[in-house]
Image: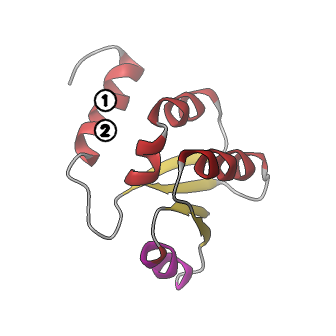
Amino acid sequence: MFLISDNTDTMMGLRLSGVEGVVVHDRDNAKKELDKAISDSEIGIVLMTTIVISYFPDVVYEKKSGIKRPLIVEIPDRHGSLKLGETIDKYISEAIGIKI
C-alpha cells in the first residue's frame, strides 16, 4: 500500500499501521506521485485522499479504469468527506452505464 495525502495527519496515522506515503499540495506533485506509485511493481494499492483526487479527478478516473494494478482507492481525509458517496455512485454509473 502507498498513500498520497493532502495532509500530514492522515499520512502519520496510516504510517503507524505500516503504510508509507507522501503529502502533496498541488495537481502537478499529486500526478507525479501517482505515476510513480503506478510504475512501482511493489505497490498493489494506492490510497488517495478525496482532496488529492479533486486536484485531477479526470486523470484519476482514467487511470482507475485503464489499469489492473495497482488498485486506486479514495479515502476521506481527517475531516471526512461529504461527497465520497457521490463519487462512488459516479464511478459505478459510468462503469455500468446506468445512473444509480
Dot 2, how many residues are within 10 Å of its Cα: few (below 14), some (14-19), or many (20+)?
Answer: some
Instruction: Return the x and y of residue 65 as percentages of the image width and height.
Output: 55, 28
Q: Considering the numbered disc 1 on the image, is that residue within a helix, a strand or a loop?
A: helix
Residue at 70%, 57% (x, y): give it.
43
Residue 17 got which mark?
Answer: none
Say which of 90 and 57 sits in front: 57
* The magenta segment: 9-16
Within the magenta stretch, is there residue 38?
no
Q: Is residue 99 left or right of residue 5?
A: left
Task: State the CA–CA distance, disc 1 to disc 2.
Answer: 5 Å
Residue at 25%, 56% (x, y): give it.
81
Majority SS type along the magenta span: helix
Look at the picture and state if 57 lies above or below 24.
above
Residue 90 got which mark?
Answer: 1
Residue at 60%, 55% (x, y): give it.
45
Instruction: Return the x and y of residue 10 as percentages of the image width and height.
Output: 44, 73
Q: Is residue 37 left or right of residue 93?
A: right
Mark 2 and mark 1 in contact (Cβ < 8 Å)? yes
Q: Considering the numbered disc 2 on the image, is that residue within a helix, a strand or a loop?
A: helix
For disc 2, the marked residue is 87
Q: Quadrant of the C terminus?
A: top left
Residue type marked 2: Thr
Q: Residue furthest bottom?
A: 16
Residue at 57%, 46% (x, y): give it.
71
